[in-house]
Image (cartoon, rainbow, N blue to C red):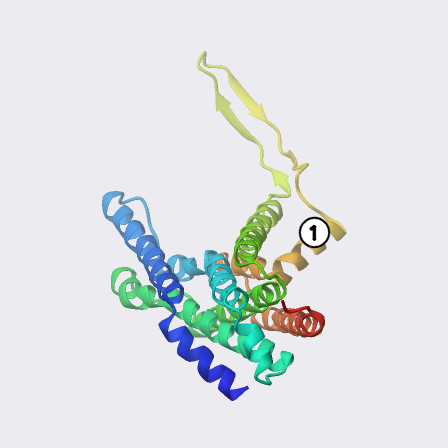
Amino acid sequence: MRNLLSAGFARLKKSKIFGIILFVMILFQCLSIFTNYSDMKHFPEYTCSLDELFFYYTIYLGIAIAVFCSLFLGTEYSDGTIRNKLMVGHTRHSIYFSNLILCSVAGIIICIAGMLPSFCAGIPLFGFFKMSPAAVISMILCSLAIAVTYTSLFTLAAMLIHSKAVIAVVAILSATLLLVAASRIQSSLVQPEIWEGYTFTMDNGDEITIETQPNPFYIRGAKREFYEFLLDFLPSGQTVRIMSETVSLSRTMFYDAVILLFTTGAGILCFQRKDIK
């Protein structure tokens, strides 16, 4: 497997798609930082801190890794690389593991690329973190774990689907849907349990009072526990947790390890039986 990794990393260094993704990650994070800084300068009432901006990159981390895995690994089928690896004596599990390790390293680098603008520009413009160093380190570790988890999911898909175009669509769409689903779950969970009463005055001077009442959209019981579990379990949910600063390092690491083990086991099992044309 050492030869596979050596050849893979050499290919990664020359990969244009990898370079483009790194550039886009840095660009998007820079835009977030400088846009918010400009808003603070033009609108004195608007305030923002590094805590709120630093982890913006996690929002598009899944899509970036989906693009990379689908195009980088999809080329192995389209160019006949996998078939050639098998013909020279490499086993299927070594091919799968080498691609998983290679893409995981690439995913971590993509994640780090998203952090760089925050260190280089965010700290000088917004000052240092308000949260504790332990909390910052915990959230950074969570984001790295999320990157590896996304990689395991999209490596599984890319190794089982022949068509580079199909896997690109499937991976990008899946990453987008996961993020949308996590956002919808979060918006449901932050609904207040009680709608507070208030009074407002009409144009004609009449005052109308709205009484305090229970919020019918507030989620309770087992459904709420299930939604909380999904946010902790899904990598997109963990991203939402990071953005809301409610992520748990221990839960994130545990669930990401479960996903990594399951996807890797399933991927190797299915790839062993796959007909390589």
Measured from the top left, where is residue 103 in percent x and y? 50, 72
Query: Is 27 situated left or right of 163 in this image?
Result: left
Is residue 100 visible in this depiction of the protein?
A: no
Q: Residue furthest top?
A: 204
Up-down: is 194 above or below 137? Answer: above
Front residue of 138/263: it is 263
Up-down: is 177 above or below 249? Answer: above
Query: Is 231 situated left or right of 243 in this image?
Result: right
Front residue of 133/89: it is 89
Residue 214's image quarter? top right
Tag 1: residue type?
Answer: Arg
Query: Is 68 situated left or right of 41 in this image?
Result: right
Question: Residue at 55% across / 55% down in the picture?
Answer: 175
Residue 128's image quarter? bottom left
Measured from the top left, where is residue 168 in percent x and y? 52, 56
Question: Residue at 42% across / 67% down in the picture?
Answer: 110
Question: At numbered mark 1, what does the secondary structure look like: helix, strand or loop?
Answer: helix
Question: Residue at 59% across / 62% down in the picture?
Answer: 162
Q: Residues within 10 Å of mark 1 (few under 14, many from 20)?
A: some
Report the number of discs.
Answer: 1
Front residue of 17/127: it is 17
Measured from the top left, where is residue 220 in percent x and y? 72, 47
Q: Residue under circle 1? A: 224
Front residue of 133/155: it is 155
Residue 82's image quarter? bottom right
